Amino acid sequence: MEPNNQENVKKEEEEQVVTPWEVASKGKIDYDKLIDQFGCQRLDPTLIQRVERLTSRPAHVFLRRGVFFAHREFNGILDAYEKGEKFYLYTGRGPSSEALHLGHLIPFMFTKYLQDAFKVPLVIQLTDDEKCLWKNLPVEETQRLARENAKDIIACGFDITRTFIFSDFDYVGGAFYKNMIKVAKCITFNQVHGIFGFTPEDHIGKISFPPVQAVPSFPSSFPHLFTGKDNLRCLIPCAIDQDPYFRMTRDVAPRIGYQKPALIESSFFPALQGDTGKMSASDPNSAIYVTDSAKDIKNKINRYAFSGGRDSVEEHRLRGANLEVDIPFKYLTFFLDDDTELEHIKQEYGSGRMLTGEIKKCLTEVLTQLVERHCKARAAVTDAMVDAFMAVRPLPNMFH
Amino acid sequence: MEPNNQENVKKEEEEQVVTPWEVASKGKIDYDKLIDQFGCQRLDPTLIQRVERLTSRPAHVFLRRGVFFAHREFNGILDAYEKGEKFYLYTGRGPSSEALHLGHLIPFMFTKYLQDAFKVPLVIQLTDDEKCLWKNLPVEETQRLARENAKDIIACGFDITRTFIFSDFDYVGGAFYKNMIKVAKCITFNQVHGIFGFTPEDHIGKISFPPVQAVPSFPSSFPHLFTGKDNLRCLIPCAIDQDPYFRMTRDVAPRIGYQKPALIESSFFPALQGDTGKMSASDPNSAIYVTDSAKDIKNKINRYAFSGGRDSVEEHRLRGANLEVDIPFKYLTFFLDDDTELEHIKQEYGSGRMLTGEIKKCLTEVLTQLVERHCKARAAVTDAMVDAFMAVRPLPNMFH
């Protein structure tokens, strides 16, 4: 097993808990510590420059601004790519709710960039089985949510000639199931207890699940896509809370004759109330949803977005905003594409010349536009398009 | 959970251990005790008479002579059948070896009788995934063995218009997988520890498996067969060591809105060396295989079949054979169809007028004929027939 001190850390310092099901921190998430605990690498500037050189386009904002900040063997993917070897992308979503929030869009926006920049195929797993197991949702409801979520994902602009979206309930079987069995054979209950915290009181559905999320990392799980390409590398863009699944996958891969998947991992998109975890689906006021109206967005930002502005205008003018904790500024670093404008806001707001109300207004505009654009794109996604993306088929345009 | 004192019994009295993976006993298996431990019912003569009345044919030798001796709710199946409701049969095999022995044939011979007598559809599960998980066999090898074993099963004479044979590696997915998830959600690790003895050191493949063997008990796992027949009852003929799987299944069924499967359970076919468990695949001299030559059969019976005959001819003539421990006599109760002839042998051998050599000769003839008949039938099974039995298709002749 690769470095994993998570369990100890979980027990000894409850300040910061990051698992696929829980992200909680008493203060700000310490990402350096997380990299240490998980044993992944920091994405350094030379790697980002290499991406720009190899793809002949500027790096995505999420790369330039450190939203995607950690990796496992991403350099190996680039080495191979440089020699003319392609790879495929794998990402996913657990369809537990109808409406996605902005945090949910981040891996998909970034994956779309990677797909376009590297011209590679992509598989997107909708883990309806996981949500049926973890949330108390009936099978049919998770499948309905999977299709609804697929529309939002498709609205991110994925190329249908290079993208296969699948629901576990529809797709598990055949080569995919064979790989699940191969993986399951390599992991004991004690190991999933250590990696995921499962206990003897947990149902065996949970205990059985990790192989389901592991096997899309192996090209042989998709015979309609990758027959004869068993050595094709896999790159997984995901939030860092999914790292335990793929740490396990990377441990198992060589034992069953497969390549380890590489990872590129993001930090969490913070809640409106402040930077101590990721947004929560259970509190609708902690997040901006892609279904929010312009009025909702404005209200939420004005009422709930934690401000680094000072208590009085005088103090603010004097000391400037605390950008470290300011949510409007943080959100702009994710979604305001223009570097010059962001730098300008940083200077003005950080020095106190710009007030909280002004930066909130700016953010409201940026997010309203983003959400409007998304809604328009989503409205254009028909059921026939969902069927087409989810059809088990060869991808006509895989590597060019 | 239905009565299950197995775990305690296993700890306190190691004399008799019966699990799906181990059948061991210091003396003769005590089937009354097993019925008590497992909480199933004894098949009484009135039930057997009812089967004869309902099917208008004599009961199978295995019923008349108590080979199938226990049940769960078999009376419920008969009640419903009497009112005109049909049911379906489910049995299976774990394909871990190429050659089947006589003990392996017993559930299939009996299931064929049930299929013919009740005119009902049948699903046969080949748990290649289980054998890949338990034995150290590669996926491809278990699938090859599954097809080889399917030939032996087909050679038992199943009606192709009413029989669906499937390999888990081929068939798991869709509605079957959805049912696996529904079942898995209802069982904790602690429960599979109690039922099957799995430990935290076991791999999660084992822990994930019980739902795979459970869900063929539910008609909705076979949409190509039973769509719109969600309430069709299931009857499972099997050896009693499989009871833990179906005790678990019966416990879960009502919680997920399904009918409990009924069971009809056999004792174990004893090893040539004596009646302390079931035959072992690891000792080729403990069993007669369907691939044994006439000479092999003769040799094995003469050399290894445990005899209840006395030490000297004089003593034997005086006291008669001990039929309780005599393997040739025991085997004849399984495979000599003629009741009059069996009774005659019982009298002659039991009184000492017939000697061990004579009863062994008689058994050799019976088994040689049985194995020859089987081999001839198996040789006629083509790959195309295997494909036809395993095709995912509606069964044209399900209920008449």
Image (spheres, coloured by chain):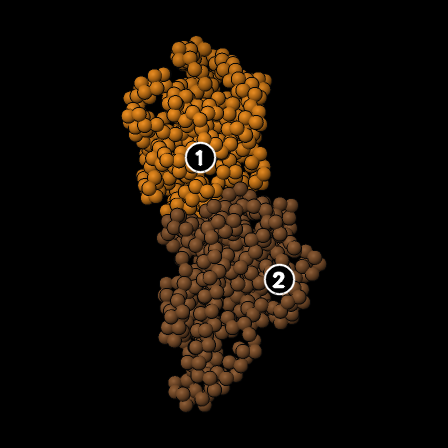
Chain colours: A orange, B brown
Q: Which disc is residue A102 wearing? A: none
Q: Nearer the viewer, mark 1 or mark 2?
A: 2
Q: Quadrant of the C terminus of chain B?
A: bottom right
* Residue at 34% from the left image edge and 35% from the top image edge: A231
> Which amino acid type is marked by label 2?
Ala
Mark 2: give few (<14), some (14-19) or many (20+) Cα within 10 Å. some
Q: Nearer the viewer, residue B10 or A251?
A: A251
Graded by Cα atoms within 10 Å as few (under 14), some (14 to 19) or many (20 or more), the crowding at tag 1 reads few
Residue beneath the point at 43% across and 29% down: A122
Q: Which residue is mark 2?
A: B117
Kindly identify which residue carries mark 1. Answer: A224
Q: Both on one chain, marks 1 and 2?
A: no
The residue positioned 36% from the left and 75% from the top of the image is B303
| A161 up-or-down from A353: above or below | below
Q: Position of residue B344 (x, y in %)?
A: 53, 81
- Give residue A98's quadrant in the image: top right
Q: Is residue A371 above or below residue B338?
A: above
* Label 2 residue SS: helix
